[in-house]
Image (cartoon, grey):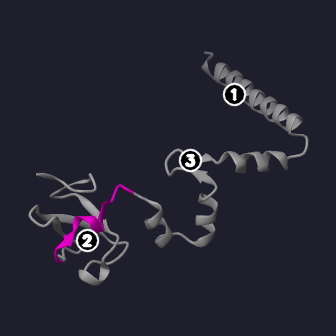
Amino acid sequence: MSTKIKSNVSFRIGQRYRVQGGFSNHSYKPNTVYTVVEIDTSDCTLRGKDESGASGNWVPWANCVPHEVIGWDFLRTVLPTEALELLSAFEGLHWLTVKEEVRDRILAKIPNLHAEILAAVGEIDAARTSQTVRDRRSALP
């Protein structure tokens, strides 16, 4: 059974989720993963159980996110400040890409960038060629 909610997130029995708000109104703990055991479509709430099997009370869907969804609000609660500062240099959370202005500043600080790039390409090519030669030799009878 899947129930569509206002935030366009579907919760279903057996799905794992985290509660991210309204902690004064329910018994759930921050940063804990729960499994949906009941859904009430009449008031947009659900109940879950933790890893030990203890059930919580009813919590509004608006205070829950599927466990697969990781956002900045959750990361701020579990990552050290240094890690958050490092991640702030990137775009997105999956397939991270360094922000253009960060990349440009880093590249500008590398002396002899052109020569460094060519040297790195040469080293990579030499390593590949060497590996190919070793592979061919090992394949000989």
> What are the residue bounds of the magenta stretch?
57-69
Residue for badge 3: 96
Is the residue under label 1 in contact with that under label 2 (CB below 8 Å)?
Answer: no
Distance, label 1 to label 3, CA atoms, is 30 Å
Q: Nearer the viewer, mark 3 or mark 2?
A: 3
122 magenta-colored:
no
**Residue at which label 2 appears:** 51
Q: Is residue 63 magenta?
A: yes
Q: How many marks?
A: 3
Q: Amino acid at mark 2?
A: Glu
In this view, the residue in front, 90 or 129, is 90
Q: Where residue 56 appears, x then y in whole percent?
A: 19, 77
Residue at figure coordinates x 60%, y 52% from the top left: 90
First along the sequence among labels 1 and 3: 3
| Residue at 57% from the left image edge and 72% from the top image edge | 80
Q: Residue 99, image x and y in percent?
A: 65, 48
Looking at the rendered structure, the kind of residue marked 1 is: Gln
Q: Which residue is mark 1?
A: 131
94 relative to 27, above or below: above
Residue lying at the far front in this picture: please name it. 6
Front residue of 141 and 55 = 55
